[in-house]
């Protein structure tokens, strides 16, 4: 029996970061951020360490989840998008699919990092602050 509490299902690839700690850290930070915001809003989070395809359809907790987040996994996400349950992709897009995506601003981050480096060499504290702020910039697209 579904509860009246809002719940978000999160798909994440258990194999991410196979040897590259930066990806593992990014996944951990992303999950921690989702959990923090959800908790502040009284929303439950169900994390599924599989791609949507590997989890099967319907995925675990289907009857309890009000929306889905897929972190850097798209295998099977198209099927989720077609159900009408909201889906947000993190760090990936599905061509031709009508769902939201959260993507890093790599170009802006690279620009900020190069400005930051130039500021460091010149002793410019303002460039330092701008570069650090820009490292965490994300862009929402629909």
Image (cartoon, rainbow, N blue to C red):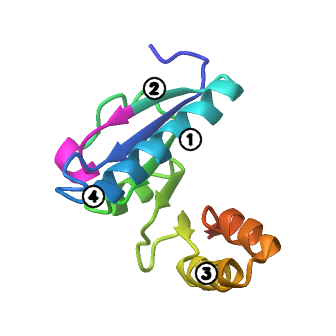
Which residues make up the magenta segment? 47-56
Q: Judge whether residue 52 is colored magenta.
A: yes
Name the residue carrying label 3. 117
Give the mark, 1 or 2, whose residue is nearer the N terminus: 1
Give the mark, 4 or 1, whose residue is nearer the N terminus: 1
Name the residue carrying label 1. 33
Indicate left or right for 39 with 51 as reference.
right
Residue 21 coordinates in the image, percent (x, y) = 29, 54
Q: Judge whether residue 6 is colored magenta.
A: no
Residues at circles 1 and 2 in contact by the CB criterion of under 8 Å:
no
Q: Measure how far apart labels 3 and 1 are at the Cα level.
A: 28 Å
Q: Which mark is residue 76?
A: 4
Q: Measure how far apart labels 4 and 3 are at the Cα level.
A: 41 Å
Give the mark, 3 or 1, whose residue is nearer the N terminus: 1
Classed neighbour count for the residue bearing mark 1: other residues with Cα under 10 Å, few (<14), some (14–19), many (≥20): few
Determine which quarter of the picture holds residue 102. Answer: bottom right
């Amino acid at each position: 029996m579904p509860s009246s509490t809002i719940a978000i299902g999160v798909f994440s690839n258990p194999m991410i970061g196979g040897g590259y700690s930066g990806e593992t850290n990014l996944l951990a930070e992303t999950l921690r951020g989702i959990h923090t915001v959800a908790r502040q809003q009284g929303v439950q989070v169900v994390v599924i360490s599989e791609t949507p395809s590997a989890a099967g359809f319907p995925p675990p907790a289907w009857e309890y989840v009000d929306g889905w987040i897929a972190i850097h996994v798209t295998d099977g996400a198209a099927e989720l998008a077609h159900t009408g349950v909201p889906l947000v992709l993190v760090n990936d897009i599905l061509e031709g699919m009508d769902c939201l995506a959260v993507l890093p601003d790599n170009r802006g981050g690279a620009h900020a990092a190069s400005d930051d480096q130039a500021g460091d060499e010149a002793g410019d504290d303002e460039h330092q602050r701008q570069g650090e702020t820009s490292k965490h910039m994300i862009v929402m697209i629909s």
